[in-house]
Image: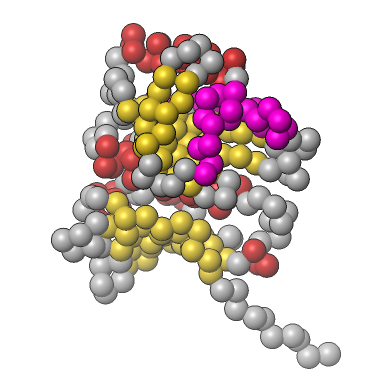
Amino acid sequence: MPTKPTVPVAPRTVVALDVAAPAATVWAHVREPHLIRRWFGWDDPGLDAEIRQIFVDLPVVGQHEDGTRTLTWPHGHDVLTVHPGGEGPTRVAVTRASHEGLSAYDGVFDPVDEGWITFLHQLRFALEVHPGQDRVSLVSTGMDAGDRHDPLLFRAGLHGVRGTPVGSHVEATRPDGSRVGGTLVLRSEHQVGIHLHGIAESLLVLVEEPAARRPPHGVVNAYLSTYGLDDATLAEARRRWAGWWGAA
């Protein structure tokens, strides 16, 4: 019986961002582990090993005549592209194989897609807002999203954040009564990202996994990237973070 010809799998653009930094700087931040640590993932004992495996050991490096550089991961067909912008910003994009070519996709939520969306926004924030600074991340994951009558984000003071346009000002009243404000910089089907203003500029990303994936209500994962905090300020940030999500 003749073999059925293989149909090429068309790539999808998962996320594409303009970053106000030189292409060489952006490229260094996807190749050098100590720089990748400033934006990728979140603080964890295994983070350094994960960075080395993902960004050093696995990808194939590509260099194109127009100065574009790529990292290609062979198994999932993921490609990270850094496009030089000349006098303008650097374009960074991630493409992946279509979902028809990804057997792990459950039809509801793709954790790799969502990871790339989070991480590239964290990359842009690190380079544009805190260039040259190391990061400390605060994380709360697996929080019950609540039903439609009592959603977690409402309890956390983030009323209406899912319907707010990118670039808009956002204010939240935390359960302890303190207020926090910022600018919405990311809104997608499953995520919102807020550039928080205050003592130190930080980036809050909220990822919502739907109920169809995490019954009965879905879950919320919250990630905060902080930079340049002294020990006392970081301790206070940890206290407020725990109070914010613990009370909510």
Q: Quadrant of the C terminus?
A: top right
From where the camera sits, is residue 37 visible? no
Residue bounds of the magenta highlight: 136-163
Query: Could you tell me which residue is drawn at 35 percent across and 49 percent down?
Result: 31
Q: How is the image coloured?
A: secondary structure
Asked if the magenta segment contains residue 159, the reply would be yes
Query: Where does residue 66 sit, x and y in percent of width and height?
Result: 25, 72
Above or below 60: residue 35: above
Above or below 169: residue 65: below
From where the camera sits, is residue 160 visible? yes
Left or right, residue 47 beside residue 101:
left
Query: Could you tell me which residue is drawn at 53 percent across and 41 percent down?
Result: 162
Query: Where does residue 21 sit, x and y in percent of width and height?
Result: 23, 50
Q: Quadrant of the N terminus?
A: bottom right
Asked if the magenta segment contains residue 21, the reply would be no
Query: Could you tell me which residue is drawn at 63 percent across and 28 percent down?
Result: 152
Above or below 17: residue 11: below
Query: Where does residue 221 sit, x and y in percent of width and height?
Result: 58, 33
Query: Could you tell me which residue is drawn at 52 percent across and 44 percent down?
Result: 163
Left or right, residue 184 beside residue 131:
right
